[in-house]
Image (cartoon, coloured by chain):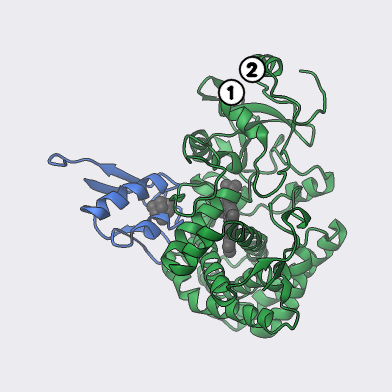
Chain colours: A blue, B green
């Protein structure tokens, strides 16, 4: 699983950072920054939640070959 | 449609059937007042049962679409074919006072009323001030503010207070001071203006005068910070604009004013209602007293449960939009009811029950889509600190009046309590 962040639409609400700061961070201007594109285990689970919560549609999940 | 002004008398089989044919499921006028903090209007349920969207008559006499489902609500709030521009005809204002509506329509547009690229640009200029990291930096100071106010409560001989005056209003007010960079020496002056500005009972003329005085104050503050730069939200915004050659005093004043209005009464009302909600559920309150880790999810549940800004999320369709079986025409007003969405039983099991552990982060109490609350991280932190500190330091806190005697703001734009007598 890979996460994609579209920084053009991010509105800096910080919901993702609140959900898992080991996966998401914010630049000083508020825009999302991925700490990792490939979260695993619990972090992968929370990353999914963050994608659900993101209000701007900036985050998406891409399932990759080999994902179980 | 019969133009009867009857309220809450629908729900019989025959009305429901006739209603369905014309898309109208209730004759009630919207927004329908909440009976008490622990009830949501029955009409929301009626709309949801029928379809999550229905044409309703507003208290202003106009018609608008009312969305009562969580999924559809989020879809529409994220759909850029719906505009937030209050200057558009048919914007579904819910205030019945024509003077207030005119004020809302005429005031210079803030980011709240902007769309598309203009909104993105304005919001992006400010977004960096509200990052999770920056907000965490404010935590110690907010803790101090909360502690000072609780010290004052505890020093009172009569062991009772109006929590609204003692804590709910002054805490967010001082936090805004801190955030904007209002100097300490001006705090009393600032609070002396914002208190009455936000008090529900202040007459519109007086409110207008206070607003002017505040704008003058904010303008002077900005001038001072221009010549004598400070490292705070206003100081940094001024410096940034100054460096880029785009210094715009008027827009800075209106931005500061928006932050003040948007972040003050909302947070204050959530503090008061949250305390009521927690005190009414002592078992669950005990749980968070014993384990502060439980406070953040508890705050989410309280935000969901009370969804105080039910009708702030209003829009106008800019083109025809098909939502399931329903066609919204260009120019139609749409209210995405946050309270109804957050009590949608398909998303929140047993929605009318407070369950502090349910995991309610996907509520829309802060809205959804591009306008989702910019101050949400700050609001969450204020609420967490207040609830943790208040019940730790005053464990015997109780309501000093029966629930029925507490004046709740049933007719206000943002729901809350006007007064909250407590004792310990
Ligand atoms: C519990 C407290 C709060 C609640 C329930 C709340 C609720 C909301 C809601 C529902 C919206 C969306 C409006 C829309 O979609 O049209 C919003 C937007 C906004 N809020 Fe909050 N808010 C709270 C606290 C704050 C605080 C503390 C601040 C700032 C210090 C703030 C500043 C704003 C601003 C500037 C917007 C406009 C954002 C935009 O248009 O992009 N709010 N708020
Ligand atoms: S939740 Fe979405 S909009 Fe908010 S900061 Fe993260 S990516 Fe940006």
The yes-or-no answer for disc 2 within 8 Å of ligand 1 is no
Badge 2 element: helix
B86 lies left or right of B137? right
Image location of residue B362, percent across then percent down: 46, 47
Residue B125 shows which numbered tag?
Answer: none
Label 2: how many Cα within 10 Å (few below 14, some 14–19, many 20+): some
Query: What residue would you read off at disc 1?
Result: B50
First in sequence: mark 2 vs mark 1: 2
Residue at the far left: name it.
Answer: A66
Residue B145 visible to an observer of this rendering: yes
The quadrant where residue B181 appears: bottom right
* Label 2, label 1: how far apart the Cα atoms are: 7 Å
* Residue B20 circle label: 2
Looking at the image, residue B312 lies above or below residue B4: below
Q: Residue B53: where, in percent of width, then height?
A: 59, 28
- Element under label 1? helix
- Quarter of the figure that contains the C terminus of chain B: bottom right
Q: What residue sits 47% from the left and 63% below the top?
A: B287
Relative side of A46 to B131, left or right: left
Give yes or no for contact between labels 2 and 1 (Cβ–Cβ under 8 Å). Answer: yes
The answer for which chain carries disc 1 is B
Place residue B159 in its image quadrant: bottom right
Q: Give the class, few, some or many, for how many residues have Cα within 10 Å of label 1's Cα (few <14, many ≥20).
A: some
| Chain at tag 2 | B
Residue B414 % position (x, y): 68, 52
Q: Is residue A46 found left or right of B388 in the rendered image?
A: left
- Nearer to me, A34 or B384: B384
Mark 1 within 8 Å of ligand 1, using the beta carbon: no
């Amino acid at each position: 699983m890979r996460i994609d962040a579209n920084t053009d639409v991010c509105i800096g609400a910080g919901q993702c950072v609140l959900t898992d700061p080991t996966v998401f961070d914010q630049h000083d201007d508020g825009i999302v920054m991925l700490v990792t594109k490939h979260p695993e285990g619990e972090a992968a689970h929370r990353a999914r939640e963050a994608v659900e919560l993101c209000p701007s549609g900036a985050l998406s999940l891409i399932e990759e070959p080999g994902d179980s | 449609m019969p133009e009867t002004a009857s309220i809450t008398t629908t729900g019989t089989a025959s009305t429901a059937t006739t209603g369905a044919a014309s898309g109208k499921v209730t004759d009630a006028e919207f927004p329908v007042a909440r009976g008490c903090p622990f009830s949501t209007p029955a009409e929301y349920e009626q709309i949801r049962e029928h379809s999550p969207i229905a044409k309703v008559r507003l208290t202003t006499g106009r018609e608008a679409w009312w969305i009562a489902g969580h999924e559809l609500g989020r879809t529409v709030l994220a759909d850029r074919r719906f505009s937030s521009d209050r200057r558009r005809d048919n914007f579904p204002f819910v205030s019945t006072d024509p003077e207030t509506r005119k004020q809302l329509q005429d005031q210079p547009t803030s980011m709240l009323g902007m769309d598309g690229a203009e909104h993105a640009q304005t919001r992006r200029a400010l977004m960096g001030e509200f990052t999770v990291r920056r907000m965490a930096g404010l935590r110690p100071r907010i803790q101090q503010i909360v502690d000072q106010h609780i010290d004052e409560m505890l020093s009172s001989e009569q062991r009772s207070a109006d929590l609204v005056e003692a804590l709910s209003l002054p805490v967010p007010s001082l936090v805004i001071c801190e955030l904007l960079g209002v100097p300490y020496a001006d705090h009393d002056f600032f609070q002396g203006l914002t208190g009455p500005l936000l008090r529900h009972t202040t007459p519109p003329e007086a409110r207008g005068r206070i607003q002017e005085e505040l704008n003058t104050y904010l303008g002077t503050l900005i001038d001072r910070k221009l010549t004598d730069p400070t490292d705070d939200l206003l100081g940094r915004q001024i410096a940034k604009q100054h460096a880029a050659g785009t210094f715009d005093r008027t827009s800075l004043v209106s931005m500061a004013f928006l932050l003040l209005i948007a972040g003050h009464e909302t947070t204050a009302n959530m503090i008061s209602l949250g305390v009521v909600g927690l005190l009414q559920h002592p078992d669950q309150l005990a749980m968070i007293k014993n384990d502060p880790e439980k406070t953040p999810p508890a705050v989410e549940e309280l935000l969901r449960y009370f969804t105080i800004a039910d009708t702030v999320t209003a829009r106008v369709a800019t083109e025809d939009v098909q939502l399931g079986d329903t066609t919204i025409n260009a120019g139609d007003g749409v209210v995405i009811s946050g309270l109804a969405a957050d009590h949608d039983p398909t998303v929140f099991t047993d929605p009318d029950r407070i369950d502090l552990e349910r995991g309610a982060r996907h509520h829309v109490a802060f809205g959804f889509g591009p306008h989702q609350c910019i101050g949400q991280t700050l609001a969450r932190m204020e609420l967490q600190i207040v609830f943790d500190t208040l019940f730790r330091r005053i464990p015997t806190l109780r309501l000093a009046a029966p629930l029925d005697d507490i004046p709740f703001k049933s007719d206000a734009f943002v729901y809350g309590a006007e007064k909250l007598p407590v004792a310990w």
